[in-house]
Amino acid sequence: MVTRRAVSEWLAVPWRLDAAVAGLLLVLAEVALQQEARADVDGAGRLLLALLAAAATLPLAWRRRSPLLVFVVVATVLMGTGAVAKGLHLVAPSTQGPAAFIIAGVLAAFSCAAHGGRRAALAGAGVLAAGFAVVPVPELLADKSVDLGLYIALGLFLGIGILFHGREVRVVELEQWARFLEHDRDQQARAAVADERARIARELHDVVAHSVSLMVVQAGSTRHTLPPGAPGDVAEALGVIESSGRQALVELRRLLGILRTEQSPELGPAPGMAEVETLVDQVRLAGLAVRLTVEGERRPLPAGLDLSAYRIVQEALTNSIKHGHPSATDLTVRYRPQALELEVTDDGGPTGPPPDGTGHGLVGMRERVLLYGGTLEAGFCGSGFRVLASLPLSETGS
């Protein structure tokens, strides 16, 4: 059983819809012409009327694939049908022609311009001008406004089709531009992530290199101060540690050379959570009122995590200054048994950083949090913006 949904899906294909419209107009035109035929018209005359109806309607099935050719055929048939039918006395002189012919003509004219573009529309207008000049209006036709009205209708729908074509071209251009912007945004996001990862790697290099250097120095010092009776395997093990450490330092320097950019590296010791009060004072001098709250007992943190925590606080406070206009910002540092939580909340309103994480500051914070398996929440909260980062301490040896 054919359902309405099945019919809709079948007609959703453009060429099927065009074929269905052409078939429907053919049936309407055939019925109308046969009814308008004179009573004394023989079989050959009725066959000619049927062929005229088919020539005026069936080409519409190809109106999207060959819009100009379809319009030339349909328009030529329409402009000549009246002269042929009335000249051969197939219909009465006062017959104005079936409405299906007019519908077929305006649809062909619209398709010529809408799907063929300006050049096809200009060519179609030329066909109309030639037909108006060449095809005479039969003297037997009492009402001559019918043919003139056909020309006006076809010309009008050629113009409407040009407007529709321009709109379609504009829509396609906007879609292409939207895809370009989306691609460009994705590229910028990937570049921002790569830059932040390189920056984090450069900072962590200093931390790791310092720890490895201490290990090498201590191993070498211990090996040289071993008593004479110490087991030989102990000295050998210390030598292996020292040699491996020096090799690791060489590889770290090579890695740093790859990560270096034209920007000069920051000099001085890497900051940590012990310098948060100094950072808050600097932000206050920049005009942002910051309230610092520390919950829990402060304790030493692993060097890499300590640096990342400091940078997260720094980025969050910088975002509050750059993207919002808060009157006050709350910074809360929570030392949990298994995690370090950093929360920055301001009242800067809806002009804060984007909640989807596309801001470069949020990218850096997210990369630092992911490096240690933590979580980051960033988004609008009430009238302000809130950043909550949680860095686990269980896997760091803290």
Image (cartoon, rainbow, N blue to C red):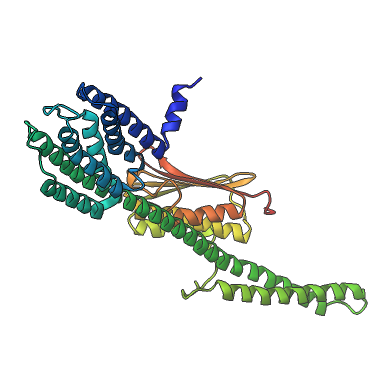
Looking at the rendered structure, the number of numbered marks drawn on it comes to: 0
For residue 214, side relative to residue 18 (left or right): right
Q: Is residue 159 above or below residue 7?
A: below
The answer to whether 66 appears left or right of 218 in the picture is left
Quarter residue 23 falls in: top left
Report x, y in % for residue 55. 30, 38
The vertical placement of 201 against 59, above or below, is: below
- Residue drawn at x 12%, y 29% is 93
Compare residues 243 and 225 and report the one nearer the observer.
Answer: 243
- Left or right? Give the position of 347 relative to 249: left
> Residue at the location (19% across, 24% down)?
38
Instruction: Specify whether residue 31 is in view.
Output: yes
Q: Is residue 333 above or below residue 52?
A: below
Task: Describe residue 127's horizontal placement relative to residue 178 as left or right.
Answer: left
The answer to whether any part of residue 333 appears in the image is no
The location of residue 227, given as percent across then percent down, is 88, 77
Q: Nearer the viewer, residue 335 or 250?
A: 250
Above-or-below relation of 123 to 267: above
- Residue extending farthest to the top is 1
Q: Residue at x 21, y 39 (%)?
A: 78
Q: For this rendering, which residue is in front, 190 or 28?
A: 28
Q: Residue 163's x, y, as percent?
A: 21, 46
Q: Quadrant of residue 270?
A: bottom right
Q: Position of residue 44 (x, y in %)?
A: 29, 31
